[in-house]
Amino acid sequence: MSSNSGRAWQAMTDFLRLQKRYMVESFAELDLSVQLAHALASIPREGMTMRALADELACDASNATGLADRLEERGLIERRVCQDDRRVKRVFLTVAGRRMQDKIQMRFLTPPAAIAALSPADQRALREILERALAFADAERVDPGA
C-alpha cells in the first residue's frame, strides 16, 4: 500500500467513524437504531427472503431474524411464507414501513455538514473519486482475481 493510498484510507475511515454519531442521532430521531434503519432500508418494495436480508446485511440468519422481529413488532414489516417453498420466509414492508423507509432514504440522501461545507468543486471531485473507487470495488466483488 502506498503512502498516499494508506493516508486516503485512514482519512476515509476516520471520517466515517466520526459520522457514525451523525447517523446514530439521525435515526434516533425516528426511534430506530442504525441497524434497524439499515435493515428496513435494505428491503425492496417487492419484498425479499430472510436469507437475502441476512446476505444484504452481511450477518447470520439469527441476527437478521432478531432485526426482523423488532421491525415486525413496530408494524414496519410483515413476514409471509413463500408460496413456492413453504420453508422460506419472505419479508415485506407494510404501509408504515414504506413511509419509514422513505424517511430513512431522505436521511441517507442528506449529506452531513462536513460534506455540505465543501466547495462545489471539492464535492464534485470527492464524488468522482468515490464513484471510481466503488467501480473498482464492484469489479473486485464480481471477479476477486481481477
Image (tube, helix red, strand yellow):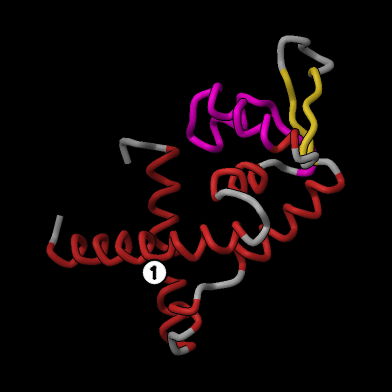
Is residue 50 within the magenta segment?
yes
Looking at the rendering, the stretch of residues picked out in magenta corresponds to 45-70
Nearer to the camera, 9 or 146:
9
Callout 1 crowding tier (Cα within 10 Å): few <14, some 14–19, many ≥20: few
Query: Picture quarter containing residue 3?
Result: bottom left
Check disc 1 and report the residue beneath it.
129
- Specify whether 140 is left or right of 97: left
At 51% from the left and 58% from the top, the residue drawn is: 24
* Image coords of residue 144 (percent x, y): 35, 36
* Image coords of residue 112 (percent x, y): 50, 73
Query: Picture quarter containing residue 26?
Result: bottom right
At 75% from the left and 40% from the top, the residue drawn is: 74
At 40% from the left and 49% from the top, the residue drawn is: 137
Query: Picture quarter containing residue 56?
Result: top right
Nearer to the camera, 45 or 72:
72
- Specify whether 99 is left or right of 65: right
- Specify whether 129 is left or right of 31: left
Quadrant containing the C terminus in the rendered view: top left
Looking at the image, the residue that sits furthest to the right is 95
* Image coords of residue 90 (percent x, y): 74, 26
- Specify whether 35 is left or right of 83: left
Up-down: is 82 above or below 23?
A: above
Residue type for callout 1 = Ile
Quadrant containing the N terminus in the rendered view: bottom left
* Image coords of residue 126 (percent x, y): 41, 74
Dominant secondary structure (helix, strand or loop) of the stretch shown in magenta: helix
At 60% from the left and 71% from the top, the residue drawn is: 110
Total labels: the figure holds 1
Up-down: is 45 above or below 78?
A: below
Is residue 65 within the magenta segment?
yes
Helix, strand or loop at mark 1:
helix
